[in-house]
Amino acid sequence: MYALADCNNFFVSCERVFDPSLNGRAVVVLSGNDGCVIARSNEAKALGIPMGCPAFQIKRHTDPRGVIQLSARHIVYSDMSQRVMMILGGEFDKIEVYSVDEAFFRLPDDEEDVLRARLARVVDKIYRYVGIPVSIGFAPTRTLAKIASHKAKKDPVNHERVQGLMKQVDIEKVLSNTSIDDVWGVGRKLTVALRQRGVFNAWQLVHFPTSLLRSLFSITMVRTQAELRGVDSVNINPVDMAHKSIMNSRTFGHVINSRREIADAVLNFAAHCAKQLRDERSLARTVTVYVRGDHFREDLPFYSNSCQVRLEAPTSGTPEIVSAALRAFHSIFREGFYYRKAGVMVSDIVAASLVQLDVFAEPQASKTRQLMSAVDHINRSLGKKAVTLVPQQLGHGDWKPSQNHEARVSATLHIHTGMSPIRKEKS
């Protein structure tokens, strides 16, 4: 048995933990620079506000109560996610964190009622300790578990937020009522192609001829069909989930023409990419930097460019990646132009354990690894920015995105192993 834990309306639920007055209200969380909707409460969904809706169009969906708009606070959401995953990790072995609000894990072979009761206790524990409502679905495969989790989230009768798909009669009933575009791995183009061939729900995909499915589509679709039939065919492991490239970028809150300010942004983006590489135990050989003006400012000349730097050896060291990023940036920066966005991407990523060592470069590489390991250890203990590069501490310029819908209750979370149940109080 596989299970999938999915946090409900995660970003909105995080905000409600710190401001209970948002409960029962139509709430949306906005993307960087308050551009569009990236999370909605059930009340906002009921008003017809779609995901990705531009913020300025929300008023078209507003009812007499209005819609509360909040700027995203990803640091808070990341910390809340760690709390949820910490509880799941304490209850089950080898959880597979699929996204910030989802995680797969294996269940022991047991009776359905026993598994349901155990998962219900976990759902209750997460809500008591973290304050986040969670739905859990369990089934013989990950794809079926995801469908079960979706059903648990949508089922108003299921107060325990747990749904299992173990009996064939239940699987057939649920798949018959699951639209093909709600199946994990079936995107928009595949949905159109399948519907043209008479496949409108998951149960019809189960009975579609496998040989024809393989010839028309890819092996991935054949595996999806096998998963729906109860055959474990999707293998998620750290190698499969490793990024081919890592990007960190921002759209600035306003246009900037200062070389120093944009260089500060590029430096921070590069440092973030290096840290993510180390978290994934990976190394990168290529660093790419791009800058771009504002397409919508007709009163300003537009300029956009990028530069790629090839490193001598794959690395995850912050100094090396930052140095390469700054070299690339200074080669493409042009005076007299105003910039609205910049970003850094590291690519040609390989697992650190698979890199062949260079007998001449190894002493320096070893020192870099030891230094970065010590820095990461200190930052985990004392805070993310306890030890950084000197320019990061200086903080030249205001290049952060604009956030005009700040939460009414500020929150700072401290992750620790001895968590105690939270108390929700009116602010």
Image (cartoon, helix red, strand yellow):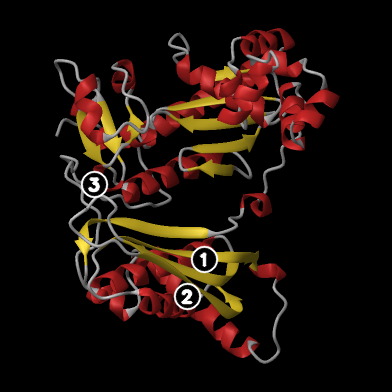
- 215 sits left or right of 114 in the view: right
Which amino acid type is marked by label 3? Ala
Neighbour tally class for label 3: few under 14, some 14-19, many 20 plus, Cα within 10 Å? some
- Return the mark for residue 321: 2
Check disc 3 and report its element: helix, strand or loop. Answer: loop
Instruction: Give whichever of discs 2 and 1 has the lower sequence position.
Output: 2
The reply to whether residue 57 is visible in this rendering is: yes
The answer to which of 139 and 377 lies nearer the viewer is: 139
Which amino acid type is marked by label 2? Ile
Distance, label 2 to label 3, CA atoms, is 32 Å
| Picture quadrant where residue 378 is located | bottom left
Residue 385 vertical position relative to residue 175 in the rendered view, above or below: below
Which residue is located at x 30 percent, y 80 percent?
390
- Return the mark for residue 411: 3
Which residue is located at x 29 percent, y 78 percent?
391
Neighbour tally class for label 2: few under 14, some 14-19, many 20 plus, Cα within 10 Å? many
Check disc 1 and report its element: helix, strand or loop. Answer: strand
Asked if labels 1 and 2 touch by Cβ distance under 8 angstroms, the answer is yes
Distance, label 1 to label 3, CA atoms, is 32 Å
Which residue is located at x 28 percent, y 41 percent?
35
Quadrant occupied by the C terminus: top left
Residue 366's x, y, as percent?
59, 83
Residue 314's x, y, as percent?
60, 75
Extreme-right residue of the structure: 211
| Picture quadrant where residue 134 is located | top left
Which amino acid type is marked by label 1? Val
Q: Nearer the viewer, mark 1 or mark 3?
A: 1
Residue 72 vertical position relative to residue 243 in the rendered view, above or below: above
Which residue does the numbered mark 1 point to in the structure image? 346
